[in-house]
Image (cartoon, rainbow, N blue to C red):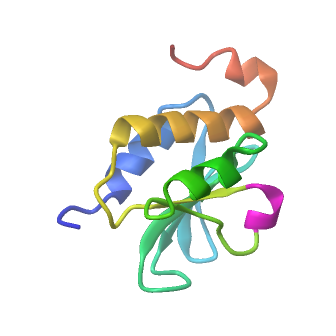
């Protein structure tokens, strides 16, 4: 990985309505009332990733299709959250969609209605 992915991930998260960023467990984490994305900079291993809420069934499908890019994160994986490796070549358009889906899973409907199209 040649560039730090955190600024791009941060920009995607903060572009969504009423998102705030705080440190949680020592990592940048984005909230829309509750957590929807958390950064993992070598938090549990020697890899860089983020964990996020995901629609039902998305984690299993994405991990099965691309285990080199997606994983079941510790702690929240049992609730269907998705882990996305950021220390591999990243498709930032796809990451933007994944972040938007995470937001839709957690945000109140009135905020989802305000999302940029």
Q: Which residue is drawn at 70% across and 56% down?
A: 81
Q: Is the magenta stretch mostly helix, strand or loop?
A: helix
- The answer to whether 67 appears left or right of 2 in the picture is right
Q: Which of 11 and 73 is in front in this view?
A: 73
Q: Nearer the viewer, residue 102 or 67?
A: 67
Q: In which quarter of the image is residue 68?
A: bottom left
Q: Nearer the viewer, residue 11 or 44?
A: 44
Residue 78 belongs to magenta span: yes
- The answer to whether 84 appears left or right of 63 in the picture is left
Is 89 placed above or below 87 here?
above
Residue 86 belongs to magenta span: no
Q: Which residue lies furthest to the left in this view?
A: 2
Q: Where is residue 89 in the image (x, y as percent from the top left)?
A: 28, 56
Q: Residue at x 49, y 55 (%)?
A: 66
Q: Position of residue 21 (x, y in %)?
A: 56, 52
The span picked out in magenta is 76-80
Q: Residue furthest front?
A: 65
Q: In which quarter of the image is the N terminus?
A: bottom left
Q: Residue at x 77, y 18 (%)?
A: 110
- The answer to whether 72 appears left or right of 8 in the picture is right
Q: Where is residue 12 in the image (x, y as percent from the top left)?
A: 44, 39
Is 91 placed above or below 86 here?
above
Q: Is residue 69 visible?
A: yes
Q: Residue at x 33, y 52 (%)?
A: 7
Q: Can residue 38 be seen in this view?
A: no
Q: Where is residue 96 in the image (x, y as percent from the top left)?
A: 45, 36
């Amino acid at each position: 990985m040649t560039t730090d992915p955190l600024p791009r991930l941060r920009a995607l998260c903060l572009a969504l309505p009423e998102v705030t960023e705080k440190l949680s467990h020592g990592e940048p984490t984005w909230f829309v009332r509750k957590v929807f994305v958390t950064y993992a900079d070598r938090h549990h291993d020697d890899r860089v990733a983020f964990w996020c809420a995901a629609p039902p069934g998305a984690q299993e499908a994405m991990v099965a299709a691309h285990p080199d890019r997606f994983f079941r994160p510790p702690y929240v994986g049992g609730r269907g959250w998705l882990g996305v490796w950021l220390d591999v070549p990243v498709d930032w358009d796809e990451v933007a969609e994944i972040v938007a889906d995470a937001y839709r899973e957690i945000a109140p409907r009135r905020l989802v209605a305000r999302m940029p199209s």
